[in-house]
Image (cartoon, grey):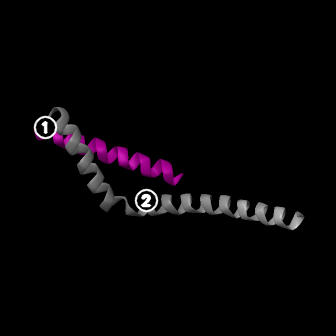
Amino acid sequence: MNPFITYTLARLGLLALTLGFGYLFGLRGPLLIILGFLGSGLLSLVLLNNQRSQLGGRISGYFSRINQKLDDNTRKEDFDE
């Protein structure tokens, strides 16, 4: 499965989980939302490290290929002159 989709779904799942726990413990309104986002963010730092690394590797590879194509085209233009 695509690392972007996996990571995004995992983040949304953590957000839903923290919002659910917050609601069960009596939090309501803006406090529920703020603590839900903070809690899911902190949990994702710990629990989703592997998925984040895979996503970063995929993005890094994508930009490396773009940079390689740009370098190849620049060398080709320099050689043509």
**Magenta segment, prevailing SS (helix, strand or loop):** helix
Q: Is residue 32 left or right of residue 40?
A: left
Q: Camera-side residue: 77 or 34?
A: 77
Q: Is residue 65 left or right of residue 45?
A: right
Q: Quadrant of the C terminus?
A: bottom right
- Range of the magenta residues? 1-26
Q: Residue at x 23, y 45 (%)?
A: 18
Of all residues, the one furthest to the top in this rendering is 29
Of all residues, the one furthest to the left in this rendering is 26
Q: Would you place residue 13 above or below residue 51 in this image?
A: above
Q: Real-space Cα distance between discs 1 and 2?
A: 29 Å
Q: Is residue 28 magenta?
A: no
Name the residue type under label 2.
Arg
Q: Is residue 10 magenta?
A: yes
Q: What percent of the width, then of the height, locates residue 55?
A: 49, 58
**Callout 2: SS:** helix
Callout count = 2
Q: Would you place residue 79 above or below residue 51 in this image?
A: below
Q: Residue at label 1? A: 27
Q: Residue at x 70, y 64 (%)?
A: 68
Q: Residue at label 2? A: 52
Whichever of labels 1 and 2 marks the residue nearer the N terminus, that label is 1
Q: What percent of the width, then of the height, locates residue 47?
A: 32, 60
**Callout 1: SS:** loop
Q: Is residue 43 left or right of residue 10?
A: left
Query: Looking at the rendering, which quadrant does residue 74 occupy?
Result: bottom right
Local packing at callout 1 (Cα closer than 10 Å; few below 14, some 14-19, many 20+) is some
Name the residue type under label 1.
Leu
Q: Is residue 74 visible?
A: yes
